[in-house]
Amino acid sequence: MATCVCLLYLFLFSTCWLTVSMSETLLLPLTHAFSKTHFTTPHHLLKTTSARSAARFRHRHKQVPLPLSSGSDYTLSFTLGSPPSPPISLYLDTGSDVVWLPCSPFECILCESKAPPLSPPLNLSASATAVPCKSSACSAAHSSLPSSDLCAMARCPLDAIETSDCNSFPCPPFYYAYGDGSLTARLYKDSLTLPNSLSVQNFTFGCAHTTLAEPVGVAGFGFGRLSLPAQLSSVSPQLGNRFSYCLVSHSFDSDKVRRPSPLILGRNEEKEKQFGNEIVEFVYTDMLHNPKHPYFYSVGLEGISVGKRNIPAPENLKKVDRRGSGGVVVDSGTTFTMLPSNLYDSVVKEFDHRVGRFNERASAVEETTGLGPCYYNDKVAKVPVIRLHFVGNGSRVVLPRRNYFYEFLDGGDGIGKKRNVGCLMLMNGGDEEELSGGPGATLGNYQQQGFEVVYDLEKRKIGFARRKCSSLWDSLKN
């Protein structure tokens, strides 16, 4: 079955309708937002990143079911309107379900310590139209509040509400909160054009004039009718129902960070198995539905192996209960993996048993980075292999060493003696009581480096396969 889509070619000032087959995929570049100029030392970089990961994770367990803290690592760019706006760069976030961006005039409160905006605030084009209060999109932005209530908030007269005649009344502003910031925005519709010239008409997005500590917008990729994949599904189910990304391994190296990571919309299940002459094996695990946080991509975790020792995961990581507690969120916007205290402590104990016997503990580095355990390793440290065991069919993922053990030079600030240091890149998310009402753990993007991660929304499963992501980008691009 073919689907009609509108392709906007920027060098032509007109639109045309073409047919796209269901096997077509779209390749887009993801850019890492890391900039070496933001951080004076590795300690500063790791401390900032670990604090942000912790804030994002712990925010999920507040009483009100809100999305994660805004993603702040990988960005996606597109244009809006006709004529098209300058390119807009937003954080890609699989942990939220709405697309919003700063609009002119724009004010960001308490943004002095934040990274600078990635693109100028949007000036709405003449083709942009406000979303009416009666629409399902308005209801989705307001946590499924009935349209009659929303139209009353928009001051539509009662007789018009009763006769469903409120199309001239715009959707009221909605409030969105993250771990360390928030915003209010109005919903608009306009044409969205991706870098490959695919255009989506009547694309719904939030236009924010004021935010608190949120200078950069977000492209939500989670479950939800306002997410970018869901809206692409209205153009082509193939494009929106299956996507993947492959994050280039960087270890915070600025040269490697600059390489684009491929985002593949409409990832073909058969073609994904073949990469040149290489047969790629994906490990799949089923998604778990979270009734409190329906936009999360949650999976079950059976345990974690450190070397030859398998450490079972607590029961709450294997499933999600009716209150929304449990499971592991696969998240593009959290940097480091967060584990519940009991599992984290067991992993650290076994890791330290194997590494601490031969390497001096770097306690001072742990205090300045927020990570641990850390070790001075004057020689190449021998570290055990870490494996993640997901629920179902022996789904096992072996993490590359660089995905969980970060090595850098300590003392490069000229004050102390320069020594090689290595730190375990997993974090303590708190005890099970603290995690009640939200996900039990998060699989961060640092641990996803060097894997193609496939989100199959139709079959509700997530797959992992080791890839050379930079080579994958070059192969698909050509």
Image (cartoon, rainbow, N blue to C red):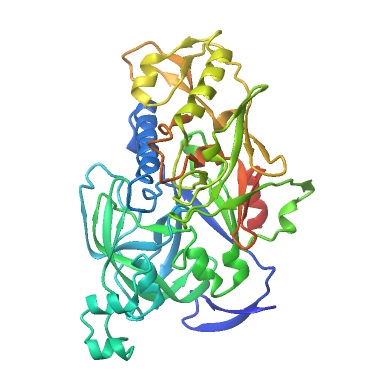
Numbered-mark total: 0
The relative height of residue 379 versus residue 226 in the rendered view (above or below) is above
**Quadrant into which the N terminus falls:** bottom right
Q: From the viewer's perspective, is 155 left or right of 12?
A: left
Q: Which of the 4 quarters of the picture holds residue 96?
A: bottom left
**Which residue is most to the front?**
322
Q: Position of residue 91 (x, y in %)?
A: 41, 53
Q: Position of residue 158 (x, y in %)?
A: 23, 87
Front position in the image: 464 or 327: 327
Front position in the image: 91 or 282: 282
Answer whether residue 412 is visible to the viewer in this image.
no
Front position in the image: 244 or 168: 168
Q: Position of residue 191 (x, y in %)?
A: 43, 75
Answer whether residue 221 is visible to the viewer in this image.
yes
Front position in the image: 304 or 89: 304
**Quadrant into which the C terminus falls:** bottom right
Question: Residue at horizontal 56%, vertical 8%?
Answer: 358
The relative height of residue 151 versus residue 315 in the rendered view (above or below) is below
Q: Position of residue 273 (x, y in %)?
A: 74, 52
Q: From the viewer's perspective, is 329 left or right of 215?
A: right
